[in-house]
Image (cartoon, grey):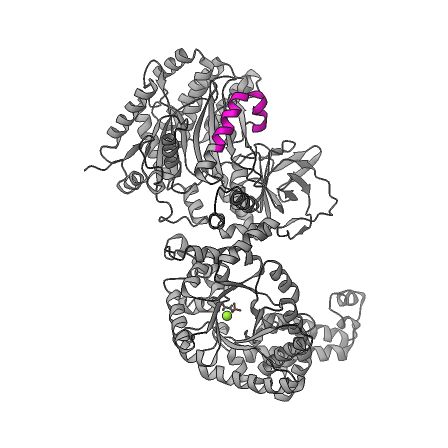
Amino acid sequence: MTAQFSYSFTTGDGKNKALLGGKGANLCEMTQMGFNVPPGFVISTQTCLSYLEQKRLPDGLMDEVRAQIADIERVTGKHFGGASDPLLVSVRSGSAISMPGMMDTILNLGLNKQTLAGLIEETSDPRFAYDAYRRFIQLFGKVALGIEDEKFDTHFNNVKRAAGIKADVALSADQLQEISELFLMVVHEETGRPFPEDVYQQLEIAICAVFNSWMGKRAVDYRREFHITPDIANGTAVNIVTMVFGNMGDDCATGVGFTRNPGTGENEMYGEYLVNAQGEDVVAGIRTPKPVQEMAKEMPEQYRQLVELRNKLEAHYHEVQDYEYTIERGVLYCLQTRNGKMNAAAMVKTSIDMVAEGLISKEQALLRINPELLEQLLHPQLAPDHDNKPIATGLPASPGAACGHCVFDADTAVRLGKTGQDLILLREETKPEDIHGFFAAQGVLTSRGGKTSHAAVVARGMGKACVAGAEDIKVDVRARLAIVGDIHIKEGDLITIDGSNGNIYLGRIPTIAPRFSEDLKTLLGWADEVARLRVHANVDTPETARLAVSYGAKGIGLCRTERMFNAADRLPLVVDMILAHNTEEREAALAKLFPIQRDDFEQLFEAMSPHPVTVRLLDPPMHEFLPNEHQLTDELDALKHYLTIVKGQRVTLDTLANAGDLPAPFNRLNEDVILEAIAKKQMMLDKVLELYEVNPMLGHRGVRLGMSYPEIYKMQIRSILEAAARCIKQRIPVEPEIMVPQVITVQELKQVKGYVDEIQNEVESQYKIKLNFKFGTMIETVRACTRADRLAATASFFSFGTNDLTQATFSFSREDAENKFLPLYEESGLLEDNPFETLDIEGLGKLMKMAVELGRQQRPELKIGICGEHGGHPRSIRFVHNLGLNYVSCSAPRIPVARLAAAHAKLLETKPL
Ligand code: PEP
Ligand code: MG
């Protein structure tokens, strides 16, 4: 049997998105359900892959295409390339996953001198026909022949200017004819050949162009950014669809709609349309369209059909749809539908509403939301009490507030983004080729276009703030200037945009963290009912612990005690401890630290009560608490220089002025104070040199510190246990867990357990209570994985430290890898993902599996969690669910993501990862 390359809308399998692409499959499905879809067919993604591999269209494809066109001719009575009643088609891309605007589309294909005459005769509307013709030449020229838009735009604008015309609609048939001829000339000049007259040749070139666009830079960048791998979408289909026209007069229109409001999730008609226009005009934001509600008055019968279409779409797909339509001479055609991309708030609201309406189940409500999306809900909002006046207002196109330096083009955004600046991309309108600028910017502002313009749709998909169609802003890209009334905004100036209400402000406005909506609470409540994994937080202060509880954390999975050491009131004590010459001096410094740590833990336990709190004993190498060698050398030099000035009594006005630059108390010109400071700095420098390690991350850190300086670990253990005792005395339920980092052998654990047992006895008799707590280990070395059974004999819980374990498995550090070679590895496919972000299931996953199995062989009830960064990453969460872990722990803002991902993990446990 010969391969089938194409499928008519009347026969294609509407469920096979992998083969027909999302758009093609939906067009087939809608056609077969009786929606009014213009006749057409799909060329499969398989054909695209074959084309990309062979670098030519497969034999037999164009024969099939001719047969498909003949079918369309039969149904429509039109003729492709015919002198009378010509058939025109659109040629559109569409892969399994929707990638809005990433690939190419050609409209009005089939026009040439002969069919143009036929179209004029058929419509008796030369203006319409020339308009269609000039659009076709430009689109075909750009997409299929690679000619820059500017080459066409210059002629277009010249004709308009010469005729004194502002709006495109005011161009006459003669002027459009002149433009078409100029465009044909551009094509000839740029390609060295006349514009193709043969309509099948046009079609063949267009099909190749759409296939090629799959490997275009825009599409490749988009797939990389959104992790669209070949198993998710491989190749694009080509949809060839009979043209219907929204620009044949005032009984014609074109529009796009969402079955619900994608900004708020409200169940209402939502969308925009333009009378007498082609679809591109709406999407490109060239004319600002009208809200669909106006159609109810302007075209009541078509509005009724549109409401019916919307209702049928949702009832069929059980999902919010993003659809496009055209009204040709009063008849409504549906041109495409796909699942609507919405922001997180709208996804949550529609999930709750659709369950209440009986349209979907709770499980579907959970599964339809990508957990990553929820982080958006924790995006900043403008402080409600700010009293800045907006300088302009546009359409609230994608919610959240963003502040940054203005940039006027995508390339500049990328360049400045690399320097770490916050940016707002400010453009008249955006196009798909600006996509890299979106990634680099915090927010997007456009002066033209509606809520369904390119800028709005893409920003919403990315969860970035966007204000669109702020028409009071005049953007002059050449002058790198935007003007609002008499205000001039230059490139680099700070502005703030509020995508929730469309306001634009000069300068930076303070933002606040948003609150959890009731809908989100309900949804995450459903998630908790389903999930087996508990979600804990990686936090170290009572404030962040309370925040984590408000996000739904059920415990602290990792309290990094070193963060407590770094606070301003403790660091000097920690430094004294490090500089101690002997155990006694060290113990004296620790005695001062002890009550502070104990109070820290008491507050933390209270904030998290009654949930478990896992406290990790000191982990980082000591030198991290001291300034570095260069800094100390510089400071010493400065002090010594200063000493010579003071000693020489060369106190002049100049030196007095310089003295002001020195920190107090040196500016008191006191020799003794300076000498003392020099001695202390010298000691620090000596210590830093003594502590120097070639590989500090693989050196004297973690439990090895506890072996060398037992008094440090003992102080921490006593702080934890006394804090617990104090809580118990106040009847605050607590569940502390003491965790040891960097363990490689059970001997280390046993030694620390020895300290714990001793201190437990002392604290219990001192406070006259019984302590109830757990003792466990981090699993973050390769040896710990391979010796997990031995460790589990002493540890009653494990927590995978996958940050260090990844470093150990790959033998490279995150900092060096991400700064140097990891981008190259990812781009060239040497590694599929950054293993510090996405858990390396194939490699590191095997070590984890071994550790879980060995650990539970030894101690079946062993509690196991993960507290590396992967604990907040949805795919990694699915993996650890399948491994049988008990909990994941992540930073506070990832908690909603992790809760939903934990529910997904349970619901999808029988499906491949
Ligand atoms: C880890 O290694 O995964 C971990 C949580 O510890 P840290 O990141 O503090 O080294
Ligand atoms: Mg670690």
Is residue 33 shown above or below 251? below
Residue 628 visible somewhere in the drawing: no
Is residue 361 shown above or below 80? below
Instruction: Judge from the rendering whether residue 488 lies leftward or rightward of residue 893; answer left or right.
Output: right
Residue at figure coordinates x 46%, y 17% from the top left: 128
Nearer-the-camera pick, 265 or 584: 265
Q: Is residue 891 magenta?
A: no
Residue at figure coordinates x 38%, y 16% from the top left: 116
Pinpoint residue 555: horizontal percent, then vertical percent. Answer: 57, 66
Q: Which picture quadrant has residue 121?
A: top left
In the displayed image of the protein, which residue is found farthest to the left? 1
Is residue 182 shown above or below 419? above
Nearer-the-camera pick, 781 or 657: 781
| Main SS category, magenta section | helix
Q: In the rendered view of the protein, which quadrant contains the C terminus?
A: bottom left
Residue 492 visible somewhere in the drawing: yes
Over which residues does the magenta segment extend? 287-311
Pinpoint residue 38: horizontal percent, then vertical percent. Answer: 39, 25
- How many numbered marks are there? 0
Is residue 865 shown above or below 7? below
Q: Is residue 301 magenta?
A: yes
Residue at figure coordinates x 54%, y 37% from the top left: 260
Pinpoint residue 607: horizontal percent, then vertical percent. Answer: 65, 67
Q: In the rendered view of the protein, which quadrant contains the N terminus?
A: top left
Nearer-the-camera pick, 228 or 178: 228
Pinpoint residue 155: horizontal percent, then vertical percent. Answer: 48, 23
